Amino acid sequence: MLFGTLDYIIIASYVLILIAVAIIAKRRDQKSLDDYFAGGKNLPWWLVGTSMVATTFAADTPLAITGIVASQGIAGNWFWWSWMISGLLTVFIYAKLWKRADVITDCEFIELRYGGKPASFLRGFRALYFAFPFNCVIMGWVTVGMAKIMSVLTGADQWTIIVILYGMTALYIAISGLWGVVITDFIQFAIAMVGSIALAYFAIDHVGGFSALKSQLARQDMLEVLSFNPFTNPEIPIVTALIWVGMAWWAAWYPGAEPGGGGYIAQRMFSAKDERNAVAGTLLFNIANYAIRPWPWILVALVSLVIFPELVDKEAGYPMMMAEVLPVGWFGLLCVAFLAAFVSTISTQLNWGASYVINDFYARFIKKEESFESSEKAQKHYVFISRLATIGMAGVAVVVSYFFDSVKGGWEFILSLSAGIGGVMLLRWFWWRVNAWSEIVAMIAATLGAIISKSLGYDFATSMIFTTTLSTISWLIATFVTKPESEETLKKYYHQVRPFGKGWKPFADGKESQDRLGPALVSVLQSFLGIIFILLGMGELFFGDRLAGISYLLGGALATWFVVRKI
């Protein structure tokens, strides 16, 4: 497929939109870290939610889904569908708590929840640990995905593509800050969804429709790829399926699915104008991320199995389908969709990573605000340094991307490296006995567990079990052998955040939280069923019983409506 004139016009128009948004964002007041990293904390729910989902709509994701479907069928997506449990707990339990914390980053929250030198160390260490090793690994696999796509479509050298894309994105985010990111996220999500749906339509049409696709899969003895059940799939070991649905969602830290929220998800919740907008925006993200977005990718992946059955790099099947089936104009739009997805994700990762480096390390330990003549001069300096940090981090990410050749491999690496730290992140809000040493030991034990697992050659499931067990036992022991936080620290935290639960009664001073766990868990269950019904309903409509599909979709819509009306 060669680019036509219309394709070039569409791509150029997108680049001009990016430039315009960056200029407008630069003209807005960006006088403080609050403005630059949290958008002034005044964003509506629909911008909060679409920004979250646009960020997770990276160029690598359709490629990873294509690889998963090729190797493990639709059921293989439970590897990441299981994360919706963590996401929905964040919506109905943690989102309002994050907003009440009134911080710029989740690392800053550490010194609200804990006190003393251990808390200071944890804040600084965690900021650098997640800003560089974790964040740059994430950007590395996103870059691999985008480079694969553009090299297939253009024939250009991957490293030339990477350098150009990072140069453009780093300059854009350095100028615009979070406000520019969320505005373009909204535009980019719309473009990416239209493009993905269009590609799915042309792909299905190319093979003669859904019935013809199902028949061709049957002729190639691949009909089992349509199954949703991970426990009956011969390509998925039972223990692996159990790890997905029973452990990975709460035990490990993963961007966009952090246990209890965190990372750029927390950053978007901080940027919401109030608690209600934080909750509604996070719910929108989970519905769009798990119920709406996956099917166009899955359909293209299924067609790629029929069109390119001998393809060695299954992840490359997605961009090859673009080149195979898209007409002029639509081809340009899909290129823009992937460019938009890449820019959205990388801009968020750079902004989020820079927020850690500046807010939680540089401004906290290197050049404190009191060393300036005035607060205004300090904030102006911090914003300037934030822009430099953004560009520097982009350079590190380019180097890291050299070491990745598989998108899903990067996903599994992050999950293995962070296994076991999720438990302490969930419980620190509600169990007063958790202290800074609990988190420090959890992170150290998780890293050691991942290294040991790698050296012993453990597979993904065994590594998750070993590292989670080691980390969880270690941080629980550390909790009980070290002193709890001071009463002053615990009272300050409780009265600002107001977490529910009887465990905080000694520190409530008669002002207990009015929030209740029971109704929140009911909302989690309702929304979980709603999303699952929508996923199953779409599958039945495409490949099974249409009446069953409509019934599932109606059930999903009803469950979702019951949840939404309570917000």
Image: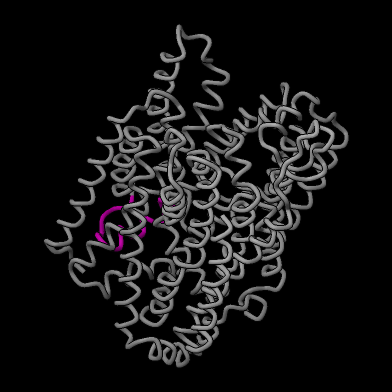
Judging depth in this view, the residue of 564 and 534 nearest the camera is 564
Residue 533 at x, y percent in the picture: 56, 75
Residue 381 at x, y percent in the picture: 41, 18
Residue 172 appears in the rendering = yes
Decide if residue 22 is on the left or right side of residue 485. Answer: left
Q: Residue furthest right?
A: 481
Residue 431 magenta-drawn?
Answer: no
The image shows residue 314, relative to residue 55, as above or below, that is below
Occupied quadrant, residue 205:
bottom left
Decide if residue 241 is on the left or right side of residue 158. Answer: right
Residue located at (62% from left, 64% from top): 82
Occupied quadrant, residue 379:
top left
Residue located at (42% from left, 74% from top): 301
Residue 415 at x, y percent in the picture: 62, 53
Judging depth in this view, the residue of 462 and 73 nearest the camera is 73
Give the tally of numbered discs: 0
Residue 154 magenta-drawn?
Answer: yes
The image shows residue 186, relative to residue 272, as above or below, that is below
Range shown magenta: 142-158
| Viewport quadrant of the N terminus | bottom left
**Magenta highlight: main SS:** helix
